[in-house]
Image (cartoon, grey):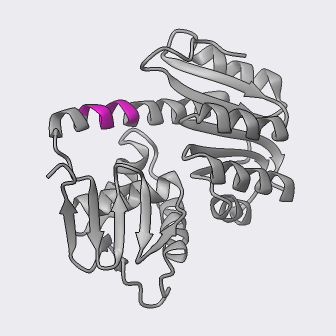
């Protein structure tokens, strides 16, 4: 079911995957008059085809249990789309959150959650999208790349390389890298990083941020005891090292 024409220039494309029809319809109702285009899918196999075709900005999985099948679907979706992925799991614990993030999700909600809670996350992504577009216009010649030692962060293509190797990171992991790179070698507090990645109005989840950073380091091939790229500053936050350089690709 779609509640807005996908051709609307400013429309945020959202795909909801699950079989709790009333809950998903409630999400649609929240955005009846907003610039949001929502597609509802009740079959995981068909969801992959739709996601690959539409490339939505936001994907939500609605599931009772975060089992092997759900995690596999999440991994498959992550492989074909650079979308924000939120998993809504009725029954789950810390282990489920870690498993969901490891499978490529950006956010995992466990326990009883409301349609309003998910709608708030969709709105947060929508605000960031608009803010990023406005910032790009204001900056004009923003850096197309950042380099940090052997790591290259290609902002234009949203890709990361370590040496000659392409590193497959999630949307949230990429946003974390860009925010740290934007600040050069300066320390960014965890609270500042949460606000930059999830939005200032979003309730900060520092434990989730810590998990994302841990997964990001793993994908970058970091030594967990002596990381080179994403460095922890005890009691404060994170910084990038070695020296970060901005590269203007328009020159």
User: Which residue corresponds to the image point at 82% horizontal and 29% vertical from the top-left?
Assistant: 20
User: Which residue corresponds to the image point at 56% horizontal and 43% vertical from the top-left?
Assistant: 83
Image location of residue 29, percent across then percent down: 64, 14
Residue 162 vertical position relative to residue 124 in the rendered view, above or below: below
| Quadrant (top left, top right, bottom left, bottom right) of the N terminus | top right
Quadrant for residue 2, please give it.
top right
Is most of the magenta stretch helix, strand or loop?
Answer: helix
Q: How many circles with numbers are drawn on the protein?
A: 0
Q: Which residues are magenta?
A: 129-134
Nearer the observer, 183 or 96: 183
Q: Horizontal placement of 161 versus 136: left or right? A: right
Residue 184 in view of the camera: no
Residue 2 vertical position relative to residue 161 in the rendered view, above or below: above
Residue 201 lies in the magenta stretch: no
Nearer the observer, 150 or 105: 150
Residue 67 in view of the camera: yes
Q: Most extreme residue toward the front, as rendered? A: 251
């Amino acid at each position: 079911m779609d509640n807005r024409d996908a051709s609307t220039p400013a429309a945020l494309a959202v795909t909801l995957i699950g079989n709790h029809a009333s809950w998903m319809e409630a999400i649609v109702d929240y955005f009846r008059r907003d610039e949001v285009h929502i597609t509802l899918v009740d079959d995981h196999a068909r969801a992959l085809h739709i996601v690959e075709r539409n490339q939505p900005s936001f994907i939500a999985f609605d599931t009772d249990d975060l089992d092997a099948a759900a995690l596999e679907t999440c991994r498959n979706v992550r492989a074909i789309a650079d979308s924000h992925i939120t998993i809504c799991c009725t029954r789950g614990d810390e282990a489920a959150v870690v498993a969901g993030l490891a499978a490529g999700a950006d956010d995992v909600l466990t326990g009883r959650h409301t349609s309003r809670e998910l709608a708030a996350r969709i709105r947060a992504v929508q605000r960031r999208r608009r803010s990023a577009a406005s910032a790009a216009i204001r900056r004009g010649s923003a850096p197309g790349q950042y380099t940090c030692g052997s790591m290259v962060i290609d902002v234009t293509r949203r890709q990361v390389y370590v040496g000659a190797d392409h590193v497959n990171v999630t949307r949230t992991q990429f946003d974390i890298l860009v925010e740290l790179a934007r600040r050069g070698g300066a320390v960014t507090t965890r609270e500042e990083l949460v606000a930059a990645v999830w939005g200032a109005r979003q309730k900060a989840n520092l434990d989730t941020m810590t998990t994302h950073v841990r997964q990001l380091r793993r994908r970058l091939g970091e030594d967990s005891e002596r990381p080179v790229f994403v460095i922890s500053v005890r009691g404060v936050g994170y910084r990038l090292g070695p020296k970060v350089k901005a590269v203007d690709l328009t020159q």
